[in-house]
Image (cartoon, rainbow, N blue to C red):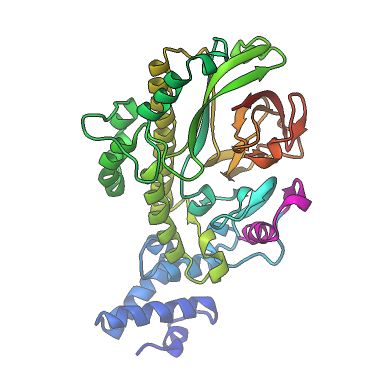
Amino acid sequence: MINGSDLLAAGWPAGPVIGAGLAAAQTLAATGQEDEHILSLLGQVAANPNGFVEDDTLGSVADAWLALRQPTNPSHSSDLRAEPVPVQIWGAELIESEARVQMDRAARLPIARQGALMADAHVGYGLPIGGVLATEGAVIPYAVGVDIACRMKLSVCDVSPYLLEQKRKRFEAALLEQTRFGMGADWSKSERPLHPVLDAPEWEALPLLRQLKDKAWTQLGTSGGGNHFVEWGILTVDNLIEDLALQPGKYLALLSHSGSRGLGATIAQEYTTIARQRHARLDKKYQELAWLGLDGEAGQAYWLAMNLAGRYASANHAVIHERVLAAAGLTAVATVENHHNFAWKEQLADGSEVIVHRKGATPAGAGVLGVIPGSMGDPAYVVRGLGTAVSPQLSFTRGRAAAGAQPGTQHAGAKAVAGIFT
């Protein structure tokens, strides 16, 4: 049985690399491999750790060597920061304590650069819902979320909103017949809609995506369960919105909230499992924040799958709006849509590239329009990002904090420009 003395004799330094090497040696020995062969493999890892980062057994050994030799590359280290990176918090007195604790953990990751916490933040998996985290060279599947690319879409119709009451049954039927609600909801083969996203070449890029394509097709144009919805409402515009060509007034509008359905959930679970294996040394409290370096095969695969799920989620809303509006005999004159469970490559003020995870948080870059859903008792809002220095490329809250907003007021880097009352 290989021991620490054997690795020291082979020139390994005392510390984490020997611990990782012994753990890997034990795993390999359990498969019946001889000590001589195991020592040879460990020697190859020591000589070229980059070549073994994706190996299920030797990946942790490679990570240990890379952390030793390249301490400036945070994605290769599992060592937590002694102090958290800066986190901008809005409405701290409104946020439950466990969400604050979750955000503090995220800010202590070696890959973390800066963060933000929205005023309606609450506990999620890993990163709190309403949390934003910029990381260096790595992506965190659970910081994106299980429902990858969960998003909002608003379609505005240039007709009197009073039609909602005058033709109530028609509008109700359009919702109930032209989409599906509930967990596992899907279409039969004869009902499946078509959309160009189904022809995307990315479906053939990974075995997992090939397996998921048919399921994704059956769920295209459906809303799922939980807090997802499709609803009619009245959009109130107080001042001209030039880029949407909307004059002041009241408009009939259709609003939807859903994401990538089973496609996104399976991708999230698959790559979170891989990330946890890569960072097995992380404390259990941090396991849901396990990350994948974008310089590795798994990280690149997740990035490809995440972006396909984003396109699929957008297509999902497109199909819902097309079918529901057509059934109601309406045409949209303006639309607004945005993800709020996603990761983007962006630049900080110093010019460095980061991966910005927004979980249940809406982008608020300068001039960017977004939709903030309310609740069953509160209105939703169309907002425009201000791109302010205090919240660079960060976010506007997704939910409750928007409920008290009025057009022209500002919250967390954005201002409301129109209200939707449903």
Is 214 part of what is drawn in magenta?
no
Q: Is residue 73 visible?
A: no
Quadrant containing the C terminus in the rendered view:
top right
Instruction: Judge left or right: residue 210 versus residue 227.
Output: left
356, above or below 316, in the image? below
**Quarter of the rendering containing residue 416:** top right
38 in relation to 300, above or below:
below
Which quadrant would the N terminus be assigned to in this image?
Answer: bottom left
**Segment tinted magenta in the rendering:** 86-109
Name the foreground residue: 24 vs 91. 91
- Residue at coordinates 74% horizontally, 48% vertically from top-left? 89
Q: Is residue 105 magenta?
A: yes
Q: Position of residue 257 (x, y in %)?
A: 50, 35
Residue 6 lies, in percent from the top left, at 41, 87
Is residue 178 depicted above or below 22 in this figure? above
Q: Position of residue 41 (x, y in %)?
A: 33, 74
The residue positioned farthest toward the left in the image shown: 190
- Image point (61%, 38%), residue name: 375
For the point 55% across and 10% down, the residue is 158
